[in-house]
């Protein structure tokens, strides 16, 4: 039993400052913002690998144009959020966007510029203005991460552990999070810190069809929930409508920016799927494609006229992915299908990244700060990571709370069990089949049965905890709203309410939105 394991059996490491868990843009932003406080940043992979930030193609949505404003950006964000956005947090995101963009410029990110030096900004779905700052068409994530990693490695206050995996959050006997159990490949190390920032990314790897790295499986969300933190809106999973359907895991993405430049979604005969243009919110487009595919047909992206010969220079990432499959998008249709792309829900935080568990902060996709609501506006994800990652790092650096090894609750030292690969694949297939673009009570109940069976075999680890939270919340939300669509409850409720959940109750408690 975990409670009987002597504390002396664990190797120890103490950080006189902040432990940041995650090497994407949110984690790096937090680590840089914490200066001069000491930071230990851990990443399960080599920095730049296994992080969704590096795969982002669109760019950073920021109101910089002469016909734009933070208020307009906020209005678009709230409209897409379908009633569940926190208005103050959205206003903060839009207002601090230009500062966050400038921090990235100062790191050396080579955003596309016009002859006059102004940012070249693209149009994406549900934006009322062209406001997405890009790098070489579809390489924003890669360029941003390269610059951020370079700055992180040069920061004297930061120590980096690569190839280090989070196994459990460590807590005091009073419940404060005071560190983590980390596996660096040669046994667990108990790392103590004044504060912990979770920046572990989303939940795409819980599903069989995803555009995110396979390593991103909701473990941070599950760890936080198992430590008693409150989870908000976990049922809201965004499916990107234009993952390239080449049978690869994960699926390569055909950026929404292609449609912003005029590419069209069509059926096998080349007939457009939308008569009024293709830049609808992602949930609307994903459901249209899902229904087409359910009828036995296929969906395609036609960029032959809109992009054509300019593909290699305008969208080199998409072009390379197509050519690797023997398909030339300059002359051929690109097969596409919806795939899990982003998680709007997560560990609930305030505007400074503080969770409901003392000592624990969260930022980026694993967090739910209230800016996305029921459906994320395109290219607000990198912006959120930069804005609220920075804020979380600042707040955590000021949360000085020395912890002694004798204060630790011994039962929080034992790493959670792993889920064997065969059962992980069973879970992924179940989640895609029963908790996908369209859901109903019968399918969600079947998913809960599978999760319970796996828990009986392996215990309630973080991956299964994250899956249970998503499914239980989706079952409890008997309406359709944003990215959550119930076949058996296709209409929204009159009043929008967020889901707030804690473990081990395993039930969804609906609470009114804060004013």
Image (spheres, grey):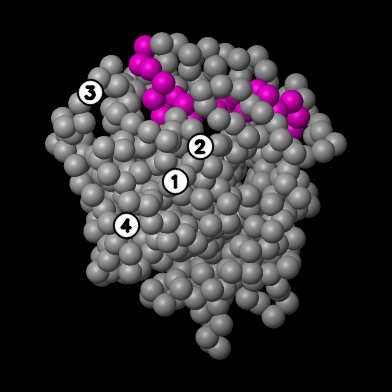
Residue 192 place in picture, x, y as percent: 28, 46
First in sequence, mark 3 or 2: give its number: 3
In this rendering, would 392 be left or right of 409? right
**In this rendering, which labeled residue sits more in front, label 3 or label 2?**
3
The residue where tag 1 is placed is 360
The span from disc 3 to disc 2 (Cα, nearest Å) is 24 Å
The span from disc 2 to disc 4 (Cα, nearest Å) is 21 Å
Magenta region, main secondary structure: helix
Relative to 444, is 80 above or below?
Answer: below
In this rendering, would 35 be left or right of 100? left
* Contact (Cβ within 8 Å) of mark 1 with mark 2: yes
Q: Quadrant of residue 424?
A: top left
First in sequence, mark 3 or 1: give its number: 3
First in sequence, mark 3 or 4: give its number: 3
The span from disc 1 to disc 4 (Cα, nearest Å) is 13 Å
**In this rendering, which labeled residue sits more in front, label 3 or label 1?**
3
Mark 2 Cα-neighbour bin, 10 Å: few <14, some 14–19, many ≥20: many
User: Looking at this view, is 445 or 290 the one in front?
Assistant: 445
The span from disc 3 to disc 4 (Cα, nearest Å) is 27 Å
The residue where tag 3 is placed is 5
Residues rendered magenta in the picture: 457-480
């Amino acid at each position: 039993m975990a409670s009987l394991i002597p504390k002396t059996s664990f190797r120890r490491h103490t950080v006189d400052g902040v432990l940041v868990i995650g090497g994407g843009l949110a984690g790096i932003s937090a680590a840089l913002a914490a200066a001069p406080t000491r930071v230990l940043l851990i990443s399960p992979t080599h920095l730049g690998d296994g992080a969704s930030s590096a795969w982002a193609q669109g760019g950073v949505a920021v109101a910089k144009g002469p016909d734009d404003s933070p208020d307009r950006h906020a209005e678009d964000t709230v409209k897409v959020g379908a009633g569940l956005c926190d208005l103050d947090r959205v206003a903060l995101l839009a207002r601090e966007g230009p500062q966050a963009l400038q921090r990235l410029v100062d790191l050396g990110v080579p955003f596309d510029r016009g002859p006059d030096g102004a940012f070249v900004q693209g149009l994406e779905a549900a934006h009322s203005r062209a406001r997405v700052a890009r790098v070489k068409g579809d390489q924003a994530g890669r360029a941003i991460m390269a610059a951020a990693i370079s700055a992180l490695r040069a920061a004297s206050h930061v120590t980096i552990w690569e190839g280090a995996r989070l196994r459990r959050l460590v807590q005091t006997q009073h419940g404060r999070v005071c560190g983590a159990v980390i596996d660096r490949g040669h046994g667990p190390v108990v790392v103590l810190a004044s504060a912990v920032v979770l920046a572990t990314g989303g939940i795409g790897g819980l599903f069989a069809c995803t555009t995110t790295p396979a390593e991103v499986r909701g473990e941070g969300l599950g760890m936080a929930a198992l430590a008693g933190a409150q989870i908000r809106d976990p049922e809201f999973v965004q499916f990107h409508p234009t993952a390239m359907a080449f049978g690869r895991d994960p699926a390569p993405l055909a950026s929404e920016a292609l449609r912003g430049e005029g590419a069209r979604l069509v059926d096998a005969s080349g007939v457009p799927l939308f008569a009024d243009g293709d830049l609808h919110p992602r949930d609307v487009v994903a459901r249209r494609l899902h229904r087409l595919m359910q009828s036995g047909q296929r969906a395609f992206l036609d960029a032959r006229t809109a992009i054509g010969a300019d593909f290699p220079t305008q969208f080199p990432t998409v072009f390379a992915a197509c050519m690797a499959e023997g398909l030339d998008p300059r002359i051929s249709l690109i097969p596409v299908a919806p795939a899990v792309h982003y998680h709007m829900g997560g560990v609930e935080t305030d505007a400074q990244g503080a969770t409901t568990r003392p000592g624990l902060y969260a930022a980026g996709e694993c967090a739910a700060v209230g800016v996305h609501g029921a459906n994320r506006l395109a290219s607000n994800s990198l912006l959120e990571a930069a804005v609220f990652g920075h804020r979380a790092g600042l707040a955590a650096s000021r949360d000085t709370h020395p912890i002694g090894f004798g204060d630790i609750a011994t039962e929080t030292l034992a790493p959670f069990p792993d889920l064997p690969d065969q059962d992980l694949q069973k879970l992924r297939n179940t989640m895609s089949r029963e908790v996908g673009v369209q859901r109903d009570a019968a399918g969600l109940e079947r998913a809960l049965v599978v999760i319970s069976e796996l828990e009986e075999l392996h215990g309630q680890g973080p991956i299964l905890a994250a899956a249970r939270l998503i499914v239980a919340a989706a079952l409890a939300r008997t309406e359709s709203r944003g990215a959550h669509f119930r076949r058996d409850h296709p209409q929204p409720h009159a009043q929008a309410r967020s889901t707030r959940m804690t473990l081990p109750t395993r039930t969804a408690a609906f609470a009114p939105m804060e004013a």
